Amino acid sequence: MSEPPPPFRRTDLPVELRVDDLLGRMTLEEKIDQLHQCGASDTNPNNLALRPDAFRPTYGSFIVGGSPAVLEVRNACQRRVVTESRLGIPAVFAADVIHGYRALAPLPLAQACTWDPELVRRGCALAAAEARAQGIDWTFAPMVDHCVDARWGRIAETFGESPHAASAFSAASVRGFQGEQLGGRDSVAACLKHYVGYGASEGGRDYVYTGISPQSLWEMHLPPFEAGIRAGARTVMSGFNDLNGVPASANQYTLTEILRRRWGLTGPVVSDWDSVVQLVNQGFAADDAEAAEKAFTAGLDIDMSSGLYRDHLAAHVAAGRVTLAAVDEAVRRVLRLKFELGLFERPYAEANALTDAAPDPGQFALLEELAARSLVLLKNDGVLPLAASARRIALLGPLAADSAPLLGCWAQYGQPAETQSIAQALKERLPAGVQLRVEQGCSIQGAASDNPAAAVEVARESDLVILCVGEDGPMSGENASRTTLRLAGRQEELVQAVAATGKPIVLVLVSGRPLELAAFEGKMSAIVAAWAGGTRAAAALADTLLGRRNPSGRLAVTWPRTTGQIPLYHNMRPRGRGGDQGAYRDMPTTPLYEFAHGLGYTTFGYGALRLDRTEVKPDGRLVAEVTVTNTGACEGVETVFWFIRDPAASITRPLKELKHFEQASLAPGASRVFRFAIEPRRDLSFPDDDGRSVLEPGEIILLVGGQSASFRVTR
């Protein structure tokens, strides 16, 4: 008669009992190995033992991804983990699935410009299904850092500058990645990153100090993380940054006081790549051993890559610097995640229709919708949509015929060959008889072979020019800081030379951040922020240029006139002096395009702003209404943005704060009443420097659609 399975193998028992049983069977070394994460991306599974960090089957997690052999490598690694370790504890496999795996959606900053959390949720669900088909259990996403400095390359991975909007997209992303139940066949564990303050890096440089006031930390940086945890995010990743003198990867206040005690996170916190050993570089630890001690005791559970926990935690336990109870609690979080993912029952990943497969029509349709809805029409003098009179079109610039930059940074296994270029998409869709001539003119970052003159000649012989400029994938994302937002290489020279021909120009910007346009913006007939729109970016753009789609994207980030205006954002505090005092003397202080700006091919009219009362108590409710009418000739999507301003408070308040947004598609002549039901404690309070909610009586100004109305909060 066979022995009954140990309790941790019994699926009929609660997860916590299974965790307790398994934890009680583990040695200290086995426990510490569960807190070590390393890479397993070698395409030859026979080489796993040759890694420089000396592969052990008791390691808790591995990073995979970015190759066609991911499933094979993952299962080969897992087989060794399960069969060669004493207890057979399966590993969890993670990857940076930021905006898709092979079928790529737009970059997160672009997704935020859709202002449609449900659409973003669907995109994340698609990414989760693809990732799980490759054997990935855990994605290092969503990134919900707050950033107002486009010099920082990772602004491309954020959801823009509004904490309210980022919170909505954070929650939607978590629900998309994790699905109805963690451990489902199309579900991966989400990881909120980078906790916290990483996006406020000095000068837009990566991996550096961030000085953030405690009140700003609670008001601007923490809300999207809290929203993600409230939505069920199982894990969090600490940031690279030094936060006010205490690095984020060893910050007891943020990692333990806030995450654990106040918000109740029960899953593990993982470091970013080598951020534990980097505590030495940051001057917070004298050596590797001290770095391991400080990070662990602050509340960091898993050490990614550096191996310092593996090398030093046992000695710290023996010396009493780290308690065994603390080690047990960290391991408990890791084991709990593995049980929730179903890894003990299904340690090996099974191939399915999405494994190493080109995107199917259903995926294409969703990706195209995301790309089209994220596109922002910044300027249009009437040249768009393209008129039938444009029979000779010049398609110019380094982004015209190159599909790879459309995939953006963190493209994982995205395939340029499966991605149409803008030239291919236009040729496929232009009416018969329209001549499309394509000329590169210059490279993205500059090369000896650049020839702007050839492109200028094509422009002269055309009725209209579509000029495609911007960035390639590596120019945004991690370690992609820039001192200027101006176009790289000879692109600006190309734009100016083509503008000198006098032809109408549609400027198409492919990028992961706002770009500096001040030198030539006035010479453009239309400007389209197409971002890095992913696998179906070109199709979405072509249909929009031709009027088959009505652009509806609105900026999730303020677009500055020049780099020198940074930081510039919608929710700034008021100045001490009015008028033009304190303003720039060499250019306007206002942005080129404001937060929430975006045009379309129809127009919308706003009726009078109505309030159902002029006073409201702290626990009361006030309903604001505005009627919006499509006053144009075609159907369109309008996003209604509700802002508030508190003109006098014990802690100064921003000039305006986004508090609610909603959108609807309206046919020509159709109207809809949009409502914002204001609950003062939820919508009008603000945090103090320790996160306590403050709600004060007094006047509040509500702003929507260029209108304002006042009401009072009473005692």
Image (cartoon, rainbow, N blue to C red):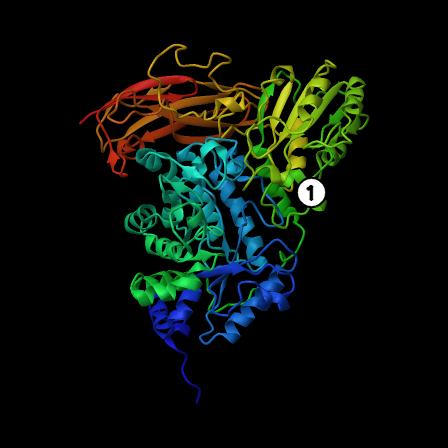
Looking at the rendering, which quadrant does residue 537 occupy? top right
Name the foreground residue: 544 vs 467.
467
The amino acid type of the residue labelled 1 equals Thr
Image location of residue 412, percent across then percent down: 60, 49
Asked if residue 295 is positioned above or below residue 545 in the image, the reply reads: below
Q: Residue at x 51, y 58 (%)?
A: 137
Point out residue 382 in the picture as x, y percentages from the top left corner: 64, 17
Image check: 557 left or right of 402?
left
Q: From what the image shows, is residue 144 above or below residue 323?
A: above
Looking at the rendering, in which quadrant would you find the C terminus?
Answer: top left
Horizontal placement of 399 versus 62: left or right?
right
The residue that appears at 39% across and 24% down in the rendered structure is 572
> Does residue 610 appear in the picture of this structure?
yes
User: Mark 1 highlights which residue?
Assistant: 419
Residue 231 picture location, percent across and down: 39, 47
Quick one: which residue is furthest to the bottom in this view? 1
Give the residue displayed 57% in from the left and 35% down from the top: 512
Q: Position of residue 314 (x, y in %)?
A: 37, 66
| SS at circle 1 | loop
- Between 280 and 350, the one lying in front of the other is 280
Asked if residue 388 shows in the view, the reply is: no
Q: Is residue 496 above or below residue 483?
A: above
Farthest residue, direction front: 286
Quadrant assignment for the N terminus? bottom left
